[in-house]
Amino acid sequence: MEIKLFCPATIANLSCGFDVLGLCLDNAGDEMIVRKVDQKGVRITKIVGADLPLETEKNVSGVAALAMLETLDELDFGFEIEIYKNIKAGSGIGSSAASSAGAVFGINELLGRPYSRKDLVQFAMQGEKLASGNAHADNVAPALLGGFTLVRSYAPLDIIRIDSPEELYATVVHPQIELKTSDARSVLKQNVSLKSAIMQWGNVGGLVAGLYTKDYELIGRSLHDEIVEPLRSVLIPGFDQIKQTAYENGALGSGISGSGPSIFALSRGKDTAEKIAKAMSDVYEKMNLPYEIHVSKINPDGVRIL
């Protein structure tokens, strides 16, 4: 008994929402096969497209799966996982989250769904802890739930899913450099000024309100990061130019995707999103820097069975 899954890429932080906001992409993602087998435990039998460890305890999907199985009565069977990676590690679009979310979703399906998708987030977070040292949910929540997600609280875990306005599109450019989440976290300050904090939570509230009211201009005004982006953007080649180019070509807003180096822009309508993609591409062509680019609707479903 086996199922094949599409495990979507995600954009986390969304400028103002560091560690609490994320969205799910529609056409970028990994594929995974999860099968039920006689041998107990969890084994990763195959990884194509990336040089990642097969050992269960060293792989994010294995760690997430084990976290979930620990909460269930001991099973007299086990699971095998095959991973087909299309999202590069360290790209800033939720590579580890796609694997973590896919593993727990697949096993949950084969067990007859003892857990809801929202319940699965806590297990997938353990994969993120292995990858970055921090059990954050801003990628795994949208990967599992689809749409936009807001992590209102981590203790206790409280996640709100928000539908995306119909015409909202994301453009993501990934310059082909690797930026580890742990390195991107190391440049952050532990304390922020009250003035910056007030500006930031105003923008978070504005972005959530804009999504609910489908107010594209409000969404755009709220996509501003006062705290993290100024520190991290220096790690990303051509960041200021890419962001400026996105605005000039009709983006509502633009910023660092996750911990980078990918840069995202949100726009109203596919034509604008594709125009932005072309303009972003031109910047990196002139810099002679290899890149990948994605234009995507917001995926309302999250991980799905193929």
Image (cartoon, helix red, strand yellow):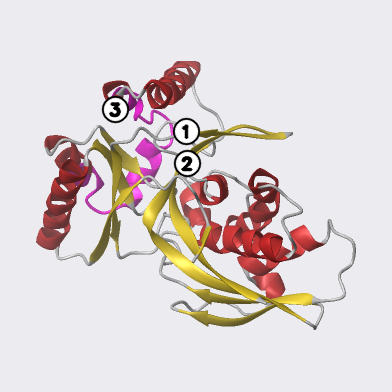
Q: Residue at x 70, y 60 (%)?
A: 108
Residue 35 position, x and y percent, is 66, 76
Marks 2, 1: nearer the viewer: 2
Q: Main secondary structure of the magenta part?
A: helix
Q: Position of residue 159 (x, y in %)?
A: 62, 35
- Compared with 270, 290 (above or below) is below
Tell me the kind of residue under disc 1: Gly
Q: Amino acid at mark 3?
A: Gly
In the drawing, what numbered circle is on residue 22? 2
- Report helix, strand or loop for mark 3: helix
Q: Nearer the viewer, mark 3 or mark 1?
A: 3
Per the model, the C-alpha gap separating discs 3 and 1 is 14 Å
Disc number placed over residue 220 in the picture, else none: 3
Q: In the rendering, at what x and y percent does residue 270 appear?
A: 21, 45
Horizontal arrangement in the rendering, residue 273 relative to residue 118 (left or right) = left
The crowding category of the residue bearing disc 3, from other C-alpha atoms within 10 Å (few below 14, some 14 to 19, many at least 20), is many
First in sequence, mark 3 or 1: give its number: 1
Q: Amino acid at mark 2?
A: Gly
- The residue depicted at 45 percent of the width and 39 percent of the height is 13
The question of residue 222 being in magenta is answered with: yes
Q: Are marks 3 and 2 in contact (CB under 8 Å)?
A: no
Pick the front one: 32 or 247: 32
**Which residue is located at x 25 percent, y 63 percent?**
291
Question: In the rendered structure, are the residues bearing label 2 and label 1 in contact, judged by CB atoms less than 8 Å apart?
Answer: yes
Sequence-wise, the earlier of marks 2 and 1 is 1
Q: Secondary structure at mark 2?
A: strand
Residue at the spot of label 1: 17
Of the numbered discs 3 and 2, the one sitting upstream in the chain is 2
Q: Residues within 10 Å of mark 2 (few under 14, many from 20)?
A: many
Q: CA distance from mark 2 to mark 1?
A: 8 Å
| Residue range of the region highlighted in magenta in the rendering | 219-242
